[in-house]
Amino acid sequence: MANILQTLALVSGPGSLSVLQLLKDSGLMVKCILALLVFFSVLSWAIILWKFFQLRRARKASEHFLVRFWAADSLDRAFSETGHFSQSPLARVFLAGYQELNRVRERRKQLEETDPEIKFPVRRELIGVENVQRAMNQEMSRELMRMGRFLSFLATCGSTSPFIGLFGTVWGIMNSFRRLAILQSAGLAVVAPGISEALIATAAGLFAAIPAVIFYNFYLNQLRYLESELENFSNEFLNIIERHYLKRLKSKLEGPES
């Protein structure tokens, strides 16, 4: 009886249920789980902050690039401006399309020199639009992968951290009941420290999971918006190429009549 009273006085003493004290008195398994959850949380916040600044830089660079692009009087002039917007996904996609367009021009020039009848072909594949489109699509995929890098960890952290914390809670409660059986006493004061220690693991799991899920969904929407923006710009660029080609074809055909 004296041992039971002494135990009750110990667990009901002031500060015995403080978080630091509970962490200090927790078992090895719970400490390992808490350390893992702290690692998940720190890494998640590092990714969250990095993605925030990365996407903000990309968005601002793309906005400035679009202003310069539409203000340029030619594609060559727009190409000369891309070096100032290395962080812009739009500038990278434009650069890939422009370089492929130059390769198509060189190839078509060689064909025109060897076969004069192929000059100003009507077939779309000979204009090189498909080649430019494929080059821009490939660059779009690379840019989306670059901007979405490590977001899968946020999804993994958000889905697994609560279960890891729950495992620590179950383990701590098992130890509490085992301690209760050893003391052979049924009372809340006896098991309260163990249960509180166990619930800290659940709280840590939720603390790591909630921000990861919120920002994962937020950044996923940002990437969807970026994908739509890249597709729209790619279509506009292809339209510019075709309009320019048809304009040259029209002037070439009307030249002899004037």
Image (cartoon, grey):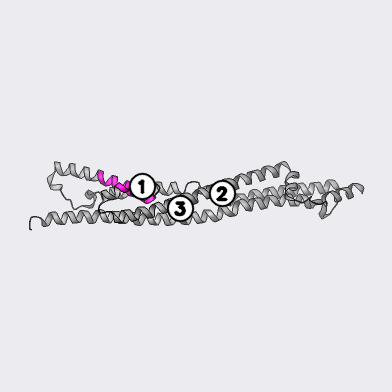
Which of the two discs, 2 and 3, labels the residue nearer the N terminus? 2
Q: Position of residue 111 (x, y in %)?
A: 17, 43
192 lies left or right of 74? right
Residue 257 in which image quadrant: bottom left
Q: Amino acid at mark 3?
A: Arg
Depth check, front residue: 8 or 155: 8
The local secondary structure at tag 3 comes to helix
170 lies left or right of 234? right
Q: Report which residue position mark 3 lands on.
A: 56
User: Can residue 135 be seen by looking at this rendering?
Assistant: no
Q: Verify whether residue 92 appears in magenta.
A: yes
The local secondary structure at tag 1 comes to helix
Please give the label number shown on residue 84: 1
Indicate which label's residue lies in the foreground, 1 or 3: 1
User: Can residue 194 be seen by looking at this rendering?
Assistant: yes
Determine whether label 2 and label 1 are within 8 Å by CB.
no
Give the CA distance from mark 2 to mark 1: 30 Å
Q: Report which residue position mark 2 lands on.
A: 45
Give the CA distance from mark 2 to mark 3: 16 Å
11 lies left or right of 155? right
Residue at image point 14% right, 56% down: 251
Q: Position of residue 205 (x, y in %)?
A: 64, 51
Residue at image point 13% right, 54% down: 252
Determine whether label 1 and label 3 are within 8 Å by CB.
no
Q: Position of residue 177 (x, y in %)?
A: 79, 49
Give the magenta part as a residue range: 80-102
Residue at image point 59% right, 55% down: 210
Label 1, residues with CA under 10 Å away: few <14, some 14-19, many ≥20: few
Indicate which label's residue lies in the foreground, 2 or 3: 3
